[in-house]
Amino acid sequence: GYILALDQGTTSSRTIVFDAELNVVAKAQKPLALFTPEPGYVEQDANEIWQTQISTAQEAIHQAGLLATDITTIGITNQRETTIIWDKATGQAVAPAIVWQDRRTQDWCEKLRQQGHEPRIQALTGLRLDPYFSASKLVWLLNHNPMLRTRAMAGELAFGTVDSWLLYNLTGEHAIDITNASRTLLMNIHTGQWDDELLGILDVPRSMLPEVRASSEVYGETMEGLLGSRVKIAGIAGDQQ
């Protein structure tokens, strides 16, 4: 059997096919645009993230002269912290993806620091208050678009990092792997789960959050029509671990 590795990075989406001995059999890569609408703002088109990733997967399988039935399993690695919100009913992204490098939430982080929240947040997450992490980006999107906040409170919107977004489009599952979850500022590193105290401090509706899953487990199977046959997704980890 063969392994399909999806590598969704900041500047490109890449897919590599490995054989059972982990030799590279084929690879395909597509560039991905970054948008900087204002100084310190870094965004991507969530749909382009998905389209470039699935097209490189199809291309790599084709290049290797294989069928989807030859693929035993799929693994995902991704740029971490990048924040995507989508509509649970339609599966469409409702805002640009805010990329990990984005610094627009500096003031929000500073305000929480001045309110004395950082020691507690650090004790629960192992992270400092920094625009780098996903929660500040998610809150920024909700606070700068009242309609998104209203819809999120009504349970209509889903949040995810890039692994969640790819997994959702591939399988329909709303989940996140623990390495990605640990970089959101919303996960308690002692329990490995989302933390109500953190959600309260940061003002994030729990209904938006994906299920936290292990890095190595079967998350689901690709939907009909994507690769030609259903393939299990069995491993996810944020890159640069």
Image (spheres, helix red, strand yellow):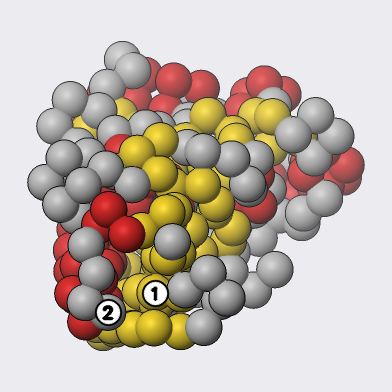
Asked if residue 52 is positioned above or below residue 96 in the image, the reply reads below
The front one of 134 and 20 is 20
Q: Which residue was labeled with disc 1?
A: 17
Q: Nearer the viewer, residue 54 or 232?
A: 232
Residue at position x 74%, y 34% in the image: 192
Instruction: Estimate the x, y position of residue 175 in percent, counting from the top left.
Output: 47, 35
Is residue 64 shown above or below 115? below
Disc sitting over residue 191 in the figure: none
SS class, disc 1: strand
Q: Is residue 210 visible?
A: yes
Q: Which of the 4 quarters of the picture holds residue 87?
A: top left
Q: Residues within 10 Å of mark 2 (few under 14, many from 20)?
A: some
User: 10 Å neighbourhood of mark 1: few (<14), some, or many (≥20)?
Assistant: many
Do the numbered discs 2 and 1 sit on residues whose CB atoms are within 8 Å? yes
Q: How many numbered marks appear?
A: 2
Q: Work out which residue is located at the far top of the displayed protein and give it.
A: 154
**Quarter of the figure that contains the N terminus:** bottom left
Residue sitting at 48 percent across and 30 percent down? 209
Q: Quadrant of residue 42?
A: bottom left
Residue 65 percent location from the top left of the image: 21, 77
The vertical placement of 175 against 8, above or below, is above
Picture quarter with the C terminus: bottom right
**SS under mark 2:** loop
Q: At 58% from the left edge and 69% from the top edge, which residue is drawn? A: 239
Circle 1: residue type? Val
Which amino acid lies under the numbered mark 2 shown in the image of this protein? Ala
> x and y percent of residue 139 in the render?
46, 42
- Location of mark 2 (residue): 64
Of the image marks 2 and 1, the number of the one nearer the N terminus: 1
Front residue of 146/58: it is 58
